[in-house]
Image (tube, rainbow, N blue to C red):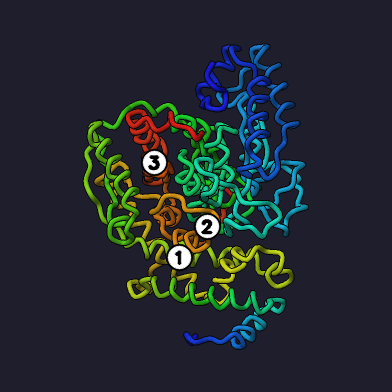
Amino acid sequence: MKDDLTLEQVRSMAAEIGLTHLTDSHLQELLRATRVARARRAALPVATLRPADEPAHVFRPDDGQ
Amino acid sequence: MTDLAWLTVAEAAELLRGRKLSPVEYTKALIDRVERHDGQLNAFLRFTPEIALEDARRAEAEISRGAWRGPLHGVPYALKDIIDYAGLPTTGHSKILKDNVAAADAPVAAKLKAAGGVFMGKLSTHEFAFGGPSFDLPWPPARNPWNRDHFCGGSSSGAGAATAAGFVPAAIGSDTGGSVRNPASMCGVSGMKPTYGLVSRRGVFPLAFSLDHVGPLTRSVRDNALVLDLIAGHDPLDPGSSPRAGGGCAAELDRGVKGLRIGVIRHFYARDMQADPEMAAGIEAAVEKLAGLGAQVREIQTAPLGEYNACNRIILTGEAFAIHEKWLQERPQDYGALTRERLLTAAFVRAADYVNATRLRRKLADSFHALFSGIDVAVTASSMDPPCRIDDAKAIEYTYGRQARAPFNVTGGPALSVPVGFSKAGLPLAMQIVGKPFSEALVYRVAQAYEQAAGWVARHPA
């Protein structure tokens, strides 16, 4: 995702996921929020993960006992 | 008799059980206090004096005939307004749920009812336990009883304000990234985020399924342990509920800290983030006090605070967005601006980012819990700053992320915020005491020893 998103690009991306009722003010919020999300993603040390590292919560079928 | 507003649960229980205090008299005194002062604090979103008096009369009749139920019998309490209480709306402090009447009690509410507690009402929260403090919602935000121009923390804002203000001796909040401990820190009370799964989350409006915890806020550590003992326990209908029974925390309280090994996670507040000097000094003085009581104190290292916080926020917002997506699509204007913006952070987060955050969560939790082979509990900062002004949006934004609470939502173990003094401006300072999963009794034991030695618990807002 590009760093220099415009309001129109965000409007289009929002529409693709059904966020069609956002006003321009809401879209400005979404633009700021998206930048925050990118910063958080960048703070995650994903390079330290090995292929077999499992998620914290995994599916456990209930055997009924 | 002591001012009834400042009775602890334990003190009130002794008086009530011995029939030296009437539940009705006690409840009326607290109702009067709420009516006189809550207009300035907004701790209650829905105050229910009629239910309180009915509960108090029932408690009085039962205690009079010798049917004492336990330490909460005849004692007032209140619930954050994301917790279902049958027949009352659970609004989440939001326009979206303002008519959402609960059909049944959440198990946590049912347990407090069964314990004979006196229900005083529903407490203010940040909208959906996420966006606040906000002035664009149907109800105003709660304010800090130590200075009502200041923020009282959140999202369990009303729970912090109500306990600190002497409206109730105990309240129940929820904590997904720090929402019990933040108001506890800012209001000078004790707030416990117990081990994930120890207290049922059923009937509590979710913020993020895998990070949500329910926990008590009280003025004293003993009260906190008493209330947690009442609300803990397995719920077969909560998929995250632990099979452990819970309880027994209050019995361990007075064993002291001599010989206990305490690890100080100093890099959270001295390197990863730099805490306000008064906050840092308060924490260091508390650590010295614990050492003086006979604890073996040493510094420990864990992953950088930023990694924990990013992990928490990606998981939290991803799960929250899934819950709110339909409303964000259909009625985004009905959210407060702060909530909407915080929820929207997950709009374009990739599935791989969410999964990677959960993979890192396992690594962070495993490595953090491994530290407990060499320590019994850890201490660190809660908030990095004393409460800022509630009307200073820039200060709210600046301080919002300056905290060390989210790591323990990630790791899932118990984390308790306790007061460590006051700033020069008279605002509360706090630290966290943290344990490995299901070590609540040990965490409370350390907190109790500190509280008894430090004496902050005797100080109340004017």
- Closer to us: B148 or B57: B148
Horizontal side of residue B74 vs B317, given as left or right: right
Q: Could you classify mark 3 by the number of other residues whose Cα lies within 10 Å: few (under 14), some (14-19), or many (20 or more)?
A: some
User: Disc 1 marks which amino acid?
Assistant: Thr
In front of the other: label 3 or label 1? 3
**Residue B323: percent from left, percent from top:** 64, 63
**Residue B257 visible somewhere in the drawing:** yes
| Residue at 34% across, 33% down | B450
| Residue at 33% across, 27% down | B255
**Residue B249 visible somewhere in the drawing:** no
B300 w.r.t. A58: above or below: above
B313 w.r.t. B161: above or below: below
| Residue at 52% across, 19% down | B2
Of mark 1 and mark 2, the one earlier in the sequence is 2
Element under disc 1: helix
Horizontal side of residue B186 vs B363, given as left or right: right
**Residue B454: percent from left, percent from top:** 34, 32
Does the CB distance between marks 3 and 2 fall below 8 Å? no
Disc 3 marks which residue? Answer: B422
Horizontal side of residue B356 vs B60, given as left or right: left
User: Disc 2 marks which amino acid?
Assistant: Ser
Element under disc 2: loop
**Residue B461: percent from left, percent from top:** 50, 35
- Closer to us: B370 or B98: B98
Disc 1 marks which residue? Answer: B358
| Mark identifier at residue B127 | none
Q: Could you classify mark 2 by the number of other residues whose Cα lies within 10 Å: few (under 14), some (14-19), or many (20 or more)?
A: many
| Mark identifier at residue B210 | 2
Q: CA distance from mark 3 to mark 2?
A: 34 Å
